[in-house]
Image (tube, rainbow, N blue to C red):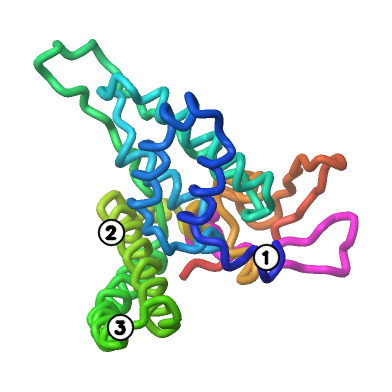
């Protein structure tokens, strides 16, 4: 993504996408696209989105009881595909848009279908970090609101850069607060069950058998805590799945597009 594209907002992309549609498609999709943009915030930068944020949006906003749910899903998938094709995002967020269906017998027409929300598994450190981040964002919000009020005193809104910047910051903060509140509401801390087994939160040091001179240490975390730079890998990833529930000395094989990689577990450290 170029520097220029990194500043593209959801509202800008929505206007561009809607303008590219035929009149009948515009009529069918515009309302769904606009509601999505309003949810995240019109000035939210596309670069600030993540798959988990889009997934949480779909889980909370697209109900199986809505007779237009599938039509809405189709519209949003095409919108996010457009964003990816334009190069505004490095991935297609549309893959996270789906209708979550509840199990069991069908409800009567007088009843709402109950939508089950999957728990968000995370480490205790992850839970504490997210709780602290939420508090920090909630603490920053009043300052941003004051900055907006001050910037509004300049009546020339067309060239009011401080007002625009403050609005963008508020949209980003509000989006992050919504995401964190949704995650924390469903958070489940996963505790380890045995001292000698790797578990969520464990640091696992491994050796690649084809490169025995190199060791790597990974921290096993939940999907929303993964951070490649910090060597935090999701237990849902190919490597994470193989390293979970292992003992020192075990060898594992991970399938990759080019073939497979073999690791030997050298050390397991629990927090």
Mark toward the viewer: 2 or 1? 2
The location of residue 2, given as percent across then percent down, is 71, 66
Q: Which residues are magenta?
A: 196-220
The image quarter in which residue 138 lies: bottom left
Residue 40 falls within the magenta-colored stretch = no
Mark closer to the chain start, 2 or 3:
3
The residue that disc 3 covers is 155
Q: Secondary structure at mark 3?
A: loop
Alpha carbon of mark 1 to alpha carbon of mark 3: how far?
Answer: 59 Å
Front residue of this view, candidates 170 and 220:
170
Front residue of this view, candidates 24 and 246:
24
The location of residue 167, given as percent across then percent down, is 36, 73
Residue 204 falls within the magenta-colored stretch = yes
Q: Is residue 197 visible?
A: no
Q: How many marks?
A: 3
The residue that disc 2 covers is 181
The location of residue 229, given as percent across then percent down, is 65, 70
Q: Is residue 139 above or below residue 41?
A: below
């Amino acid at each position: 993504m170029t520097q220029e594209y990194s500043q593209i907002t959801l509202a800008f992309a929505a206007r561009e996408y809607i303008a590219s549609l035929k009149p009948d498609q515009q009529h069918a999709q515009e309302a769904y696209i606009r509601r999505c943009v309003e949810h995240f915030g019109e000035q939210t930068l596309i670069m600030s989105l993540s798959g988990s944020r889009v997934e949480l949006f779909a889980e909370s906003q697209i109900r199986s009881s809505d007779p237009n749910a599938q039509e809405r899903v189709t519209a949003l998938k095409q919108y996010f595909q457009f964003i990816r094709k334009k190069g505004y995002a490095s991935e297609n967020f549309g893959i996270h848009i789906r209708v979550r269906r509840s199990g069991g017998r069908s409800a009567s027409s007088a009843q709402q279908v109950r939508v089950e929300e999957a728990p968000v598994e995370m480490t205790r450190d992850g839970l504490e970090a997210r709780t602290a981040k939420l508090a920090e964002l909630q603490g920053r919000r009043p300052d941003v609101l004051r900055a907006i009020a001050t910037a509004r005193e300049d009546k020339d809104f067309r060239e009011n850069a401080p007002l625009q910047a403050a609005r963008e910051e508020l949209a980003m903060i509000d989006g992050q607060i919504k995401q964190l509140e949704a995650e924390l509401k469903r958070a489940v801390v996963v505790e380890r069950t045995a001292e000698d087994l790797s578990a969520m939160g464990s640091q696992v040091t491994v050796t690649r058998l084809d490169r025995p001179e190199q060791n790597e240490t990974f921290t096993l975390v939940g999907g929303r805590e993964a951070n490649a730079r910090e060597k935090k890998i999701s237990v849902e990833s190919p490597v994470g799945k193989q390293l979970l529930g292992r003992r020192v000395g075990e060898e594992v094989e991970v399938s990759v597009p080019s073939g497979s990689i073999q690791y030997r577990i050298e050390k397991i450290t629990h927090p």
